[in-house]
Amino acid sequence: MGGIVGVHGIGKYKYYLEAGRSVPGAAEAMRLKWDRYLHLALGAESSAYFSEIAYFAHHLHAGGGRETAPQSFAAMESSAQQVLIGWAKNLGVGEHVTGVLKSVTGWLLTRLDSRSEAFAKLFAPEVATYLTDQGKREKSRAAVADVIRRVRPKVVIAHSLGSVVTYETLWANPDLEVDLLLTLGSPLGMRNVIFERLLPAPVNGRGERPKGVKRWVNIADKDDIAAIPPGLRDCFTGIDAEELVNLDWIDFHTVEKYLGCPALNPHLRPYLA
């Protein structure tokens, strides 16, 4: 049985391109980085923690020559526009003004720094593609299921959109069993964007820990504009622990910051040989 499987978040198509359109190459490049990030936090003698990164970003893109984000709200597909509008409303923008398009684009230009704006322009299209294109959704879940089934890890660490893919994958494949599911910067509870569209759908306003998961821990940064709400216990039953951390108000969503967070240490220690 393997140790840890990672599931990546948004904006990772570049690894596929840099690896010459090789999924194993992209996954290995990410694994080396994730090992380095986690090693800095744990300070253990070993520097190899992840057995594999479950890579799915190539399924969410049309196969172009480079990873690009729309340069403006108007340039986005309508489904991505709706994700961005719903996300902005979760942040309290556009609820009490007329002309949602104007309010959202104006807010992005005047309130977000360049890093946050770039994040939004990647987040909305990839989330929209995953939620609206069932073929790509199934392929993404199959990619994650294949790695978990083959490696049989004790721990799965899922970041960002990867937590959504992992949640649905574990529900869709009841044969998959994991001792610890650790979600980082998860948008699983984001109302009117992701939460209501999960498979399986929430019942009476609540989702549930996948049956094959023994323990679920959620960690979110207080300034992470993807983890809305940061706490998931109001949305899901079966979350054993969750922590609100303060990583970096600018670098608020990167897996590097999350894996380097001391909050992971007590949850992962029991699974490290």
Image (spheres, grey):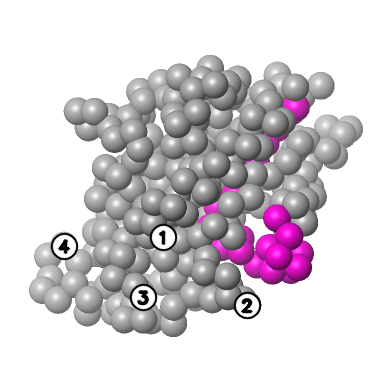
Helix or strand or loop: what does disc 2 sit on? loop
- Whether residue 97 is visible to the viewer of this picture, yes or no, is yes
For marks 3 and 2, the one nearer the N-term is: 2
Q: Which residue is mark 3?
A: 76
Q: Which residue is mark 1?
A: 129
Q: Which residue is mark 2?
A: 65
Mark 3: few, some, or many residues within 10 Å (few <14, many ≥20)? some
Helix or strand or loop: what does disc 4 sit on? loop
Q: Position of residue 122 (x, y in %)?
A: 48, 67
Residue at left 65%, top 67%? 14
Q: Would you place residue 244 above or below residue 212 in this image? A: below
Pointers 1 and 4 in contact (CB under 8 A)?
no
Q: Which mark is residue 95?
A: 4
Q: Which of the 4 quarters of the picture holds residue 6? A: top right
Question: Which amino acid, mark 3?
Answer: Met
Question: Which amino acid, mark 1?
Answer: Thr
Q: CA distance from mark 2 to mark 1?
A: 18 Å
Q: Quadrant of the N terminus?
A: top right
Q: CA distance from mark 1 to mark 4?
A: 25 Å
Residue 8 magenta-highlighted: yes
Residue at left 28%, top 32%? 202
Find the magenta span and give its range: 2-23
Q: CA distance from mark 3 to mark 4?
A: 21 Å
For marks 3 and 4, the one nearer the N-term is: 3
Q: Which mark is residue 144?
A: none
For marks 1 and 3, the one nearer the N-term is: 3
